[in-house]
Image: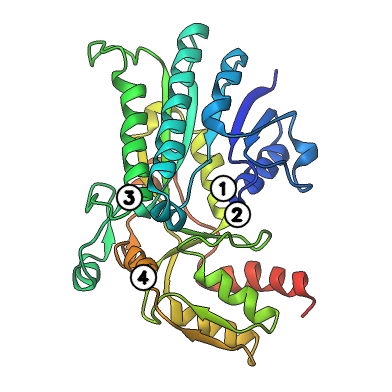
Amino acid sequence: MSEKQVLVTGACGEIGQALVQGLSKHGGYKIVTADFAALPDSIKNLSAEHVQGDLVYKIKNFYDYDFDIIFHLAASLSSKAEVATEEAHRINVEGTMQLLMLAAYRAEKYNKAVKFLFPSSIAAYGLPDIQTKKIAGMLKEDEWNIPHTMYGCNKLYCEKLGMYYGKYFGQKHLDANPPTMLDFRALRFPGLISALTLPSSGTSDYGSEMLHAAAQNKPYTCFVREDTKISFMAMPDAIKSLLMILDVPREKLSSNVYNLAAFAITADEFRQRALQAFPDAKITFESNPRRQGIVDSWPEDVDDSLARADWNWKPDYDVNRFFDDYFMPEIRKRYGV
């Protein structure tokens, strides 16, 4: 059986590095990577080819490739996107649309389905205030889709673009097969935490930043309030979910977009875990109005029952397993504590 050709954009990011390693371990894939940066040593030997540079200007290079699968991970993240909104829109929307057009073109030319995997985000939600957030509780995919950030707007719009190119591009009758055979699948991730790569100053990175600082005996000032609560997930579960949904037959999927959840905890609960492991940790809280506002607009948790029903999704790491079996052992190993 021949290898399937896979494109992974944003390969140098936290998800990208872990995904390339997961695909390589799984086997059966020829992996082409793309990123603005050069590949790190952790995945350099796993990529058959790396295309370095601004993705929006490099996409034309991929029209000669016969991709079976595209994982589009490249993005300008939430905090940065709020500072440079036009650039974020160019990267997050224009880059995604051009890749969707590429996938649709390749599917039509080769008369075969191209799977397009897109990591969306809880940033696609937007709650107006803390009281509403607490009352709302766990949100389903179609609730409170009123994002407060450029990043969230970009993610929600790209979900809709994926559905358009997968279902309506070419405007065949709705009873007919999709004209392009573009198979778009999006996962709305909560805050993702990797034990193997350093946090990249994302809006949900305060928990992992806190623990990295505590392990190095460095003081840390958390940029959100102690009671701030959102959903999180261990990076291995994020990779597991991407590889799981990749293999699910299209007819078993009732949606193009799925919530994913693992555990929801407050910033103070992160602090308590840090103090349990490192009693001398110096952790304080000083809410940053801009970043606090972003996190306050995200739900405390999400309802992932659709993913559980359609493709048997279930995370391996609940909150205790995350800290005890995954994150803390790797943190101690990294810093020799």
The Cα–Cα distance between marks 4 and 3, rounded to whole angstroms, is: 16 Å
Per the image, the residue denoted by label 4 is: 292
Looking at the image, is mark 2 or mark 4 earlier in the sequence? 2
Of all residues, the one furthest to the bottom in this rendering is 280
The Cα–Cα distance between marks 2 and 3, rounded to whole angstroms, is: 22 Å
Cβ atoms under marks 2 and 1 closer than 8 Å: yes
Looking at the image, is mark 4 or mark 3 earlier in the sequence? 3
Closer mark to the observer between disc 2 and disc 3? 3
The Cα–Cα distance between marks 1 and 4, rounded to whole angstroms, is: 30 Å
The residue carrying pointer 4 sits among few (fewer than 14), some (14 to 19) or many (20 or more) residues within 10 Å by Cα, namely some
Closer mark to the observer between disc 2 and disc 4? 4
The Cα–Cα distance between marks 1 and 3, rounded to whole angstroms, is: 22 Å
- Amino acid type of the residue that numbered disc 1 sits on in the rendered structure: Lys
User: Between 292 and 172, which is closer to the camera in this rendering?
Assistant: 292
Per the image, the residue denoted by label 1 is: 240
Q: How many marks?
A: 4
Q: Is residue 142 left or right of residue 328?
A: left
Cβ atoms under marks 4 and 3 closer than 8 Å: no
Q: Secondary structure at mark 3?
A: helix
Q: Is residue 14 left or right of residue 286?
A: right
